[in-house]
Image (cartoon, grey):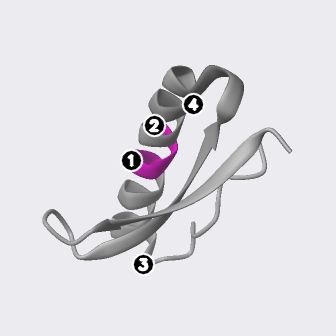
């Protein structure tokens, strides 16, 4: 297992939804990683019109 799938709504900032993976055993690091991935996805969506959706989640 090891991972919790969270559905976070960014309605206050950019009216988008993003998937966050939090690693139970190191959840502080997991949160930082998720912020990084979500930021990359948001920037990618802005630049590529959504073609980068899901990128980085499998890493």
Q: Main secondary structure of the magenta part?
A: helix
Residue at horizontal 47 percent and vertical 57 percent from the top: 41
Residue at horizontal 64 percent and vertical 65 percent from the top: 54
Name the quadrant of the N terminus: top right
* Relative horizontal placement of residue 49, taking residue 11 as reference (left or right): right
Task: Name the N-terminal-most of marks 4 and 3.
Answer: 4
Q: Residue under circle 2? A: 36
Asked if marks 4 and 2 touch (Cβ < 8 Å), the reply is no
* Relative horizontal placement of residue 58, taking residue 23 as reference (left or right): right
Task: Name the N-terminal-most of marks 4 and 2.
Answer: 4
**Which image quadrant is residue 46 in?**
bottom left
Q: How many angstroms separate mark 4 from mark 3 (CA)?
A: 27 Å
What element does badge 3 sit on? loop
Task: Name the N-terminal-most of marks 2 and 3.
Answer: 2
* Relative horizontal placement of residue 52, taking residue 57 as reference (left or right): left
Task: Name the N-terminal-most of marks 1 and 4.
Answer: 4
**Which image quadrant is residue 55 in?**
bottom right
Q: Residues within 10 Å of mark 1 (few under 14, many from 20)?
A: few
Q: How many angstroms separate mark 4 from mark 2 (CA)?
A: 10 Å
> Which residue is nearer to you in this view: 35 or 56?
35
Q: How many angstroms separate mark 1 from mark 3 (CA)?
A: 15 Å
> Which residue is nearer to you in this view: 48 or 32?
32
Q: Residue under circle 4? A: 30
Residue at horizontal 67 percent and vertical 34 percent from the top: 23
> Which residue is nearer to you in this view: 53 or 20?
20
Q: Nearer the viewer, mark 4 or mark 2?
A: 4
Name the quadrant of the C terminus: top right
Q: Residue under circle 1? A: 39
- Segment tinted magenta in the rendering: 36-40
Residue at horizontal 51 percent and vertical 44 percent from the top: 37
């Amino acid at each position: 297992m090891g991972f919790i799938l969270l559905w976070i709504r960014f309605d206050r900032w950019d009216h988008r939804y993003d998937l966050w993976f939090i690693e139970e055993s190191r959840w502080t690091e997991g949160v930082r990683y998720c912020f990084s991935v979500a930021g990359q996805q948001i920037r990618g969506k802005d630049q590529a019109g959504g073609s980068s959706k899901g990128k980085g989640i499998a890493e």
